[in-house]
Image (tube, grey):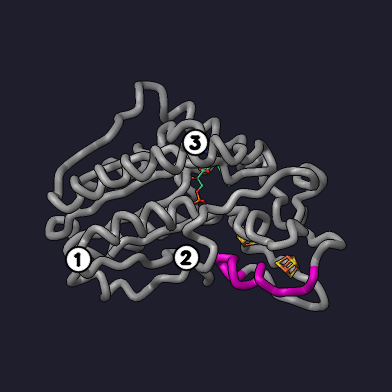
Amino acid sequence: MIFYFSGAGNSYAVAKQVADQIEGEQVVPLARFNDFKQCDNAKQIGIVFPCYGASAPDIVLDFKNKLFSHINKENIYVFAIITYANSAAGSYLDFKEDVDAWFKVKMPESDIYSTSAPGPAKQKSLLDKSVTEINNFAKDILNKKDTIMYRPIPGMRFISKQGNKLIKHIYKDFDKKLYSDDKCIGCKLCIKVCPVQNITFDEKPVWGSSCVNCFGCVNRCPKNAIQVGKKTKNKKRYVHPDYKNIYY
Ligand SMILES: Cc1cc2nc3c(=O)[nH]c(=O)nc-3n(C[C@H](O)[C@H](O)[C@H](O)COP(=O)(O)O)c2cc1C
Ligand code: SF4
Ligand code: SF4
């Protein structure tokens, strides 16, 4: 089983590309998974997720802790893949006790609040490069190789913790800053793209308090009508091309 958490689709696409190369393998969104008995017969278990603030997102760490309290790691090959835009930083450190293999892959930026999505040419070159890298991971995973793709330099845990504190500060009131502007056509797609079911609809989208700032709704609204405060108004959106028809 390959679990994924994804906002703009990068981690979904990576998980899917690996799964497609392993007979009988499937991808499963981790945000709502709780039937861990299903993992008992898994030949391998993967977790694919984005780097948030130099670390794994909290929702992924919570899932990982639940998963590892249910499965017998001795009998199952466990791997993790982190997708990131600039640096995977110390994210491996939260997984090093638990995984047999660890991979990272650079993908287009999904956070269009603190930074910006790359233009089409840069997106294409990143995605083209990622396909080759992911095919190589898939070979290692098929052969159950104990590959640790990188080990952070000493001091990286400290740097990651600072990065994570900063991102948590920046995104403290994220859900309160989300709104739909007058471009909204009421199609309700945003409800279907939220991995944690944080959006309802009452004449216009309404955001609850469980947002995990994945940027899925912001990037995937077909009218670019979802804003985070004022900073996203004129920014381009990014969605991985393989994610267009994936809903929750
Ligand atoms: C809230 C947030 C924080 C992020 N922080 C980092 C970061 O610290 N370092 C980094 O390289 N990329 C960071 N990114 C970019 C994503 O890790 C990257 O674009 C990832 O591939 C997105 O995956 P997804 O489409 O599966 O959500 C961040 C993205 C978001 C939404
Ligand atoms: S996806 Fe965009 S256009 Fe559709 S209801 Fe949500 S905010 Fe409005
Ligand atoms: S409300 Fe939007 S940003 Fe928040 S978790 Fe849902 S899709 Fe992601």
Q: CA distance from mark 1 to mark 3?
A: 33 Å
Where disc 1 sits, the SS reads: loop
In primary-sequence order, the first of circles 1 and 3 is 1
| 219 shown above or below 161 | below
Q: Is residue 193 covered in magenta?
A: yes
Please name which of the two marks, 1 or 2, marks the residue nearer to the observer.
1
102 in relation to 192, above or below: above
Quarter of the image with the N terminus is bottom left
- Mark 1 packing: few (<14 Cα in 10 Å), some, or many (20+)? few
Q: Identify the residue shown where x is 59% and y is 41%.
A: 120
User: Is 197 in front, or is 235?
Assistant: 235
Residue 54, label in figure: 3
The magenta stretch is: 185-197
Q: Secondary structure at mark 2?
A: loop
Q: Secondary structure at mark 3?
A: loop
Residue 38 seen in the figure: yes
